[in-house]
Amino acid sequence: MENRIPPGRRRSDGFRECRLVNSIIVEPREHVFETILGQDSAKGLLRTMIASSRLPRALLIHGRPGVGKKSLAYALAKLVNSFPEGERGDCRSAACRKIARGIYIDLIEIAPSGPGGQIRVESAHEAEARLATPPIEGQRKVLLVLDAHRMNVATANALLKTIEEPPSYALIILVTDRPGMLLPTIRSRTTPVRCCEVACETLAGWLLERVTELSGDRERARFVAALAEGRVGRALELIATGLLESRNDCLQALVDFHREGYRAFMITAYRLAQGGAGLAGALSLLFSWYRDLLVNQLAPTATELLFNKDQSERLRGIAARLPVAGLVEALERIARRFDLADRIAIPQLVLESLLIEVGIATKC
């Protein structure tokens, strides 16, 4: 059931796939409660509500990107149809097996599609029609709305009545990393379940046991865990971009950028874009670099706070020449570009415009 990634291959999106020591479940639909790292509070709450038959009929699972929301949603769909064995990794119930394979007839999924990446109103109408009939295989029929913030007003209004008065056998799960974008009428009629980040040390240990790229190096594992801010999915994505292999070359490009000035923005952007880590990886490295420069300015002796601890000497020398206000502005400008990482964008062009702004802000 677990999705094992062969060594050395590249995925269709260009990311290089992780080599593993122990298998990692990379598909959210394959998870059960037992295989999800962290989320103890959310899992405990849901487990208690199911056991006491008090599970609300409409839930809003929310949290930051890569934190494990979709994994929890699929695991919950399994558990409500095979309680309590559905939370174990060795569960062989029909619900667990078929949801993992994407063929469970009592699980209805709708997600963004087509131009604009919105959830179409037609998808909502089709889902409502399927939800109107009782479950065929399981105890509960589950409607799963992925990236629910992508519903336009027409789609949200089409689903509103179903969310207000779902059938007695139905469970509706909305999943989003932007709950504030949902209509207030939708938010008020769903019970929120928040997915939280895990401790960086916990994530680092988990990665260290499973990913061969880390080569048993705890500092590298801590670097990835800190850069991912305790989000498992984000950490695996960063590793899959080839971040660890390209890191030294990319950081050298930034050192050269500071030496030669912002006039070298084009060659620096090219080196970052060609580093193999993709736009997301390049932005993460940029953010970690300028964040460490700011730490050096504000707390020069606190090397334990650095992401790039092995670069402490270089960071100290560069930070001494840069204004604090400029570093803060540089971090703000880098943070704004993260939204482009999951869209269709040319990394070099994004990085060129960003480095011009960063260079001007820091007076390179």
Image: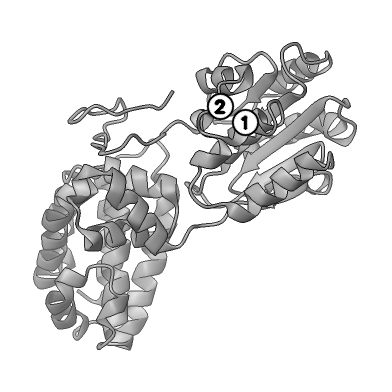
Against 16, residue 322 (above or below) is below
Write down the quadrant of residue 16 in the picture. top left
**Foreground residue, 337 or 356?**
337
Amino acid type for the residue under numbered disc 2: Cys
Percent coordinates x, y for residue 236 in the rendering: 35, 44
Ranked by sequence position, the earlier of labels 2 and 1 is 1
Q: What element carries label 1?
A: helix
**Relative horizontal placement of residue 97, taking residue 356 as reference (left or right):** right
Residue 228 seen from this side: no
Q: Label 2: which residue?
A: 91
Looking at the image, residue 225 lies above or below residue 32: below
Quadrant containing the N terminus is top left
49 with respect to 337 (left or right): right
Q: Give the residue at x 38% y 73%.
A: 329
Residue 353 in sight? yes
- When asked about the image quadrant of residue 259, the answer is bottom left
Left or right? Give the position of 36 relative to 171: left
Q: Are marks 2 and 1 in contact (CB under 8 Å)?
A: yes
How many numbered badges does the structure rendering display? Answer: 2
Up-down relation of residue 1 to residue 266 (above or below): above
- Closest to the observer, 131 or 281: 131
Q: Which residue is drawn at 26% across and 62% down?
A: 356
Residue 80 is situated, as x and y percent measured from the top left of the image, at 71, 31
Q: Distance between the residues labelled 2 and 1?
A: 6 Å
Q: Which label number is shown at residue 175?
A: none
The circle drawn on residue 86 is 1
**Depth check, front residue: 84 or 194:** 84
Identity, as a three-letter code, of the amino acid under mark 1: Gly
Q: In this view, does 312 lie to the left or right of 40?
A: left
Camera-nearest residue between 176 and 23? 23
Give x and y (percent) for residue 59: 74, 41
Q: How is the image coloured?
A: one colour
